[in-house]
Image (spheres, rainbow, N blue to C red):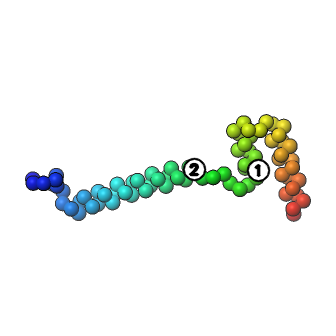
Amino acid sequence: MAGWGFGMDAGAWIWMLVWVLALIAMVWLIVRSDHRPPADDPEAILRARFARGEINVEEFERAKLVLHQETRSNR
């Protein structure tokens, strides 16, 4: 056993590198998918603001009524 090979040939090192890179790519894709920006749906944004406590129940209900009135008038 001479050198830095640890009993593995160059092909084994290349495949190990490929699998490590594939694992890193999968983890990156999973983490990235959890941080998507909020949907462009106004009601979803309103629900998210209410869930975060940025608006109270009265503001939520009032805004929801306005959104529903606007969608009816746009049809």
Picture quadrant where residue 74 is located: bottom right
Viewer-nearest of discs 1 and 2 = 2
Say whether residue 54 is left or right of residue 37.
Answer: right
**Relative to 23, residue 62 above or below:** above
Disc 2 packing (10 Å; few <14; some 14–19; many ≥20): few
**Relative to 57, residue 29 above or below:** below
Q: What residue sits 9% from the left and 54% below the top?
A: 2
**Relative to 56, residue 3 above or below:** below
Say whether residue 69 is left or right of residue 50.
Answer: right
Under circle 2, the secondary element is loop
Residue found at the very far left of the displayed protein? 1
Residue contact between numbered discs 1 and 2, judged by CB atoms under 8 Å: no
Task: Find residue 35 and name its label.
Answer: 2
Q: Amino acid at mark 1?
A: Glu
- Percent coordinates x, y for residue 65 in the rendering: 86, 47
Under circle 1, the secondary element is helix
Q: What residue sits 66% from the left and 51% below the top?
A: 38
Q: What residue sits 34% from the left and 57% below the top?
A: 19
Q: Earlier in the sequence, mark 1 or mark 2?
A: 2
Residue identifier under label 1 = 43
Q: Quadrant of the C terminus?
A: bottom right
- Between marks 1 and 2, how big is the CA–CA gap? 19 Å
Q: What residue sits 86% from the left and 43% below the top?
A: 62
Disc 1 packing (10 Å; few <14; some 14–19; many ≥20): some
